[in-house]
Image: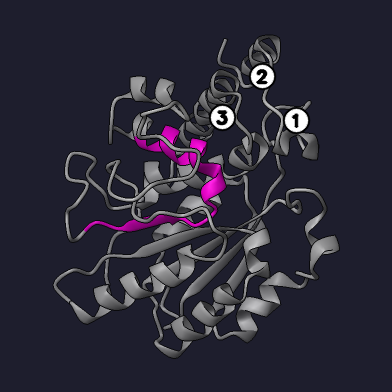
Amino acid sequence: MNMVLREPNAEMLRRKAAELRGRVVLMSHQAQSAHLASSLSCCDVLAAAYWHALRIEPSKPNDPTRDRFILSKGHAAMAIYTTLAFRGFFPVEKLDTYNQDGGQLAEHPPANLLPGIEAATGSLGHGLPIGCGIALSGRINKAQPYRVYALLSDGECNEGSVWEAAMFAAAQKLENLCVIVDYNKWQATARSNETLQLAPLREKWESFGWDAIEIDGHDVGLLAKLLSNIPNGSGKPVAIVAHTVKGKGVSFMEDDNNWHYRAPTAAEVEAAHKELGLI
């Protein structure tokens, strides 16, 4: 696929990521919902994807030629909901209904309820296998040359389904498929490498036949360039191992796993918004 790559506006992307983080913190407070820190760690990936790399049209969420983005780490639903709302897929006001009875914004992303949600996720390890199927379909149907992105948590790399899908993607040479691993080094109750030995993670993806790269997952400019450059000419699916910080952007939440389940108070929301430069 030939295309002209645009130079990313890194400052704009950083600002978008800060706005996403601010709204996610507020949503967690309003709903008294968990998974705040996990949502904050992936906001730079989402900003780079949705405000630079993805070929999407929010007014046409089912356009068959659109790029697909699957939030495999469905526990970070607040981040994808905020991204889709800010990007124009549905009204921002709907975010106030997050995790409320009768609402569409469940604690994990549902299928077929919200524009822009490509798959129901939450149970770990499902997003990449779904992405493989969609990517293969896109390659077979050359009239729909879309790309497929799957954002995984590092904890998902514990799952056998991830590695079965990784082998399938390499065997099928799905060069239109890209995985981003949000490598924030934490799982629900322990460090990732204390749960199962993930390192060396980039080398694992390479050994499974992927073109893999290891980067700072908060470098929005680099993320935007890499996500735009799919396929990258290697003839292989691409894995981006993105080193991130859980709770990124709010100093008193960063790398503190208490924020996996804890929701902020109103005063902590205000403090977070000040740090993010939103007030």
Q: Given the current orientation, which residue lies at the most extreme right position?
A: 194
Residue 1 visible in the current orientation = yes
- Figure quadrant of the C terminus: top right
Q: Position of residue 122 (x, y in %)?
A: 52, 53
Amino acid type assigned to the residue bearing label 2 in the image: Ala
The residue that appears at 65% across and 58% down in the rendered structure is 215
Q: Which label's residue is closer to the chain start, 3 or 2?
A: 3
Residue nearer the viewer, 205 or 8: 205
Amino acid type assigned to the residue bearing label 1 in the image: Met
Give, as a single range, the part of the protein colored magenta.
66-84
Q: CA distance from mark 3 to mark 2?
A: 9 Å
Q: Residues within 10 Å of mark 2 (few under 14, many from 20)?
A: many
Q: Position of residue 165 (x, y in %)?
A: 50, 78
Q: Residues within 10 Å of mark 1 (few under 14, many from 20)?
A: many
Residue nearer the viewer, 139 or 229: 139
Contact check, label 1 and label 2, Cβ < 8 Å:
yes
Disc 2 target residue: 272
Label 2: element kind: helix
Disc 3 target residue: 21
Disc 1 target residue: 253
Please tell me whether residue 59 is drawn above or below residue 194 in the rendered image.
Answer: above
Q: Position of residue 9 (x, y in %)?
A: 44, 39
- Figure quadrant of the N terminus: bottom left
Q: Given the current orientation, which residue lies at the most extreme bottom position?
A: 171
Contact check, label 3 and label 2, Cβ < 8 Å:
yes
Label 3: element kind: helix
Please tell me whether residue 180 is drawn above or below residue 188 in the rendered image.
Answer: below
Q: Is residue 245 left or right of residue 52?
A: right
Q: CA distance from mark 1 to mark 2?
A: 9 Å
